[in-house]
Image (cartoon, rainbow, N blue to C red):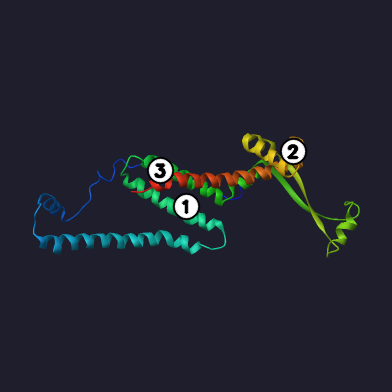
Amino acid sequence: MWSEIKEFKKYPMPEKNAWDKKHYDPIRWLYHLKDKEKEYPQWLEKYFFDPYFNLKNWLINFFSFFKKLYVWIPIIWKDRDYDDYFIFEILKQKILQQRNYLVRNNRHTNIPQDNHWMTVCLNLIERIQKSHYEVEYFEYQDSKHDFVEITEENESDYHEIISNSESKKLYRMETEYITDNRVDFINKYPLDRDKAINYLKKYRNCDVSDYAENEESRSSICVVMSTMRHQKAIKILFLILTQKIEAWWD
């Protein structure tokens, strides 16, 4: 793998839900007064309950802001506007935070399912960002590359190539495979393999059914398969979001 893939695990489910947890409140005894007394003095509501609740919520939001700032500053610091990677990074961070918040509170019965699907989305985003599916087949080969100058001796169309070029000295890259197990990669995903072969036959007029013996056919199938698998991961990610995201609330 060219870059390390982070593996997200499901957030640990708490033993208790938010309704069972005890929260300290210095005037909890007054809640009972407010709940039990159908008619209580208006001054109590106006000058005590409302200001207290407003101040309490303001303090919660105030400290929450700094907590969010601490989490988001490293993300924003590294954010750029020229690549899809950073769009996915913002989305990944938001799903991560919301997943952890929902699971910690554990307020409804769908939390385990939300935990699962949000973790699936995190892992898909990570693999999309790191181009995992586009470079996976490189794990099945070991090769070295060399640049060889194009000459009359090694290129039959030498004069035509030179005449169409501004440079009089050209090179081509030659690849030597030390180990080549790409057949294992191709056969590992039979559905994607068949789609790639059909695509190459239909749109590129290439018969690659001999990929087990032909190196060029293997290369073509691997490239097409990798592109298809990368695009499939993006489609699956947004399909999950389309079907699940509106249920991710507390």
The amino acid type, in three-letter code, at marker 2 is Val
The amino acid type, in three-letter code, at marker 1 is Lys
- Work out whether residue 249 or residue 24 is closer to the camera in this orientation and state it: 249
The amino acid type, in three-letter code, at marker 3 is Asn
What residue do we see at 51% from left, 46% from top? 237
Tell me if label 3 and label 2 are in contact, CB under 8 Å: no
Disc 3 from disc 2: Cα separation = 43 Å
Task: Name the residue tied to disc 2.
Answer: 208
Pinpoint residue 35: horizontal percent, then vertical percent: 14, 50
Pinpoint residue 234: horizontal percent, then vertical percent: 55, 47
Task: Name the residue tied to disc 3.
Answer: 115
Image: 48 above or below 250 = below
Residue 8 appears in the picture as rendered: no
Pinpoint residue 189: horizontal percent, then vertical percent: 62, 36
Nearer mark to the viewer, of 3 and 2: 2
Occupied quadrant, residue 50: bottom left
Dot 1, crowdedness within 10 Å: few (<14), some or many (≥20)? Answer: some
